[in-house]
Amino acid sequence: NKSASSNFIRNIVIEDLQAGRVKEVVTRFPPEPNGYLHIGHAKSICLNFELADEFKGRTNLRFDDTNPLKEDTEYVEAIKEDVKWLGFEWDGLYFASDYFEEMYNRAVLLIKKGKAYVDDLSAEEIRKTRGTLTEPGTESPYRHRSVEENLDLFQRMRNGEFKDGEKVLRAKIDMSSPNINLRDPVLYRIAHATHHNTGDKWCIYPMYDFAHPLEDAIEGVTHSLCSLEFEDHRPLYDWVIRECEMEHVPRQYEFARLNMTNTVMSKRKLKMLVDEKVVDGWDDPRMPTIAGLRRRGYTPEAIRAFAREIGVSRSNSVVDAKMLEHFIREDLKLKAPRTMAVLRPLKVVITNYPEGQVEMLDAENNPENPAMGIRQIPFSREIYIEQDDFMENPPSKYFRLFPGNEVRLKHAYFIKCHDVIKDEQGNVVELHCTYDPETKSGTGFTGRKVKGTIHWVDAKHAVPAEFRLYEPLILDGQEDGDSFLENINPNSLETLHGFVEPNLKDSKPHDKFQFFRHGYFNVDPKYTTPDKLVFNRIVSLKSSFEL
Ligand code: ATP
Ligand code: MG
Ligand code: MG
């Protein structure tokens, strides 16, 4: 179990338990419901849940819903589904918005202690007077309002007497602190907006840096894990807990976010792809969202194994997207039946095979997992092969079909190509071949050898299917910055129409197969209908068969 391998946060937990600082490990996964979860969130989910599981603690799912303008119930539901699908069960399901009253009361406490004040400066003025790394900030002219005046103004902010942006509540800490986060950060802002959970009850909303530590403290979270950008916010986190006199003291620990090649990893950017209709929704199989990966055909097991492998550290790095592919191949290797599909069909007539005759051939379902048994596939006079398994004028070292050459049909016979039929434009539309009955697969024929084995499906019995092949949506080196929308890979989706073996006729959404030589495929849950099978290629086989 790789989760038991060392990561620095796990070591902290072990020390805390051993020293008796913590009785029970409590973690939380705190998404903002402003989009669908992505593979980066999966890293955080696995870390939080697996850490608590290992030490018999618990993990809450908490929606960090303090910004009514961007949040939506659709996202709440999608996030719940994704966490469950990954295989985790939360202990409590909470909404930060359920704590608004308590947060308000804690803010009032800060005001009473002289630790917070209502400021009339605009957001722009506050930014300008915050100073820089080398220059201290300057105090707001409203910083020395009396406690009474602040209490009155804050109450009136809550009552809706002011417009958005007219006033904020700020912590009174230190305008010359070397840590800019401590230069009187904003705690509350006014937003006259309907909230997905609290409706119109509130028109002031707490800022992340104020809300998050309180949420953790209220829930008894012991280890609050967040990404490295929040390292400089930790002193503020601790300040809020202390000055708000929270009984329970949670601790924040930071770890490196997951970044991946060819992948934009931010809900905001992923939403742009959805809104601009670059993709077909949040669950487009090219998206790095959990929903997209699921529709593509990824399994929870593969994603969890990936998360364990990348581990948890404090240094930012970029993980090669191929690593994720490795784990789905590993997971499906023994699970997925292997079968044949022809993606770009070329008809072959076997001229010496009796007309009207059909025979059933035995085919192993997974040579690496014999327990998966064998199936029977029909073979007759007309079959389809892959267009690029034939070349009229092949280069040397081409061992597949060409005029005069003999190849093995997987699970069937040797065939030899005699005639090439073309249409008026000169395109190859059909091949005439002969087969040798002596060479039947499984009979131990050793008379002669062929160098190529190709796949096929029987023309009369094959089931038509659509295949969707994917390339990365984001071109190399375009993962960062905001210009990614102009650098979308134009070839990220290729749709083909071909055939699968007849046994696949009744396949259900999310059934997974390895198509011989083509890779792993998933039955698409969105576009598959009782009359039409649509397959998403999850990943190709490692050894490509391209020339
Ligand atoms: P995004 O910018 O994609 O919206 P976020 O951090 O704002 O990311 P949240 O919904 O606030 O998204 O995140 C919930 C949790 O997931 C946080 O604890 C956050 O640290 C973690 N998380 C988000 N993205 C990543 C990532 N790429 N790698 C690891 N953890 C992540
Ligand atoms: Mg966030
Ligand atoms: Mg965000």
Image (tube, rainbow, N blue to C red):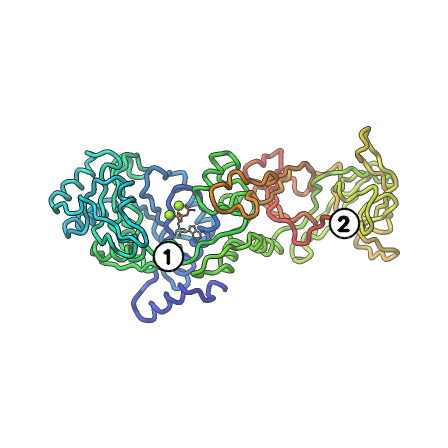
Can residue 334 be seen in this snapshot?
yes
x, y percentage for residue 345?
73, 38
Identify residue type, mark 1. Leu
Q: State the mark number for residue 415.
A: none
Q: To which residue does mark 2 refer?
A: 410
| Outermost front residue | 135
Q: To which residue does mark 1 refer?
A: 225
Residue 52 to residue 535: above or below = below
Contact between labelled residues 1 and 2, with CB atoms less than 8 Å apart: no
Q: Residue at x 24, y 33 (%)?
A: 163
For mark 2, does the 10 Å Cα neighbourhood hold few (<14), some (14 to 19), or many (20 or more) residues?
A: some
Left or right: 177 in relation to 304:
left
Task: State the residue in front, 16 or 355.
Answer: 16
Can residue 290 be seen in this snapshot?
no
Q: Residue at x 26, y 59 (%)?
A: 249
User: Callout 1: helix, strand or loop?
Assistant: strand
Left or right: 273 in relation to 431:
left
Q: Nearer the viewer, mark 2 or mark 1?
A: 1
Is the CB atom of the residue marked by disc 1 within 8 angstroms of ligand 1's nearest atom?
Answer: yes
Q: Residue at x 55, y 54 (%)?
A: 320
User: Which of the 4 image quarters holds residue 493?
Assistant: top right
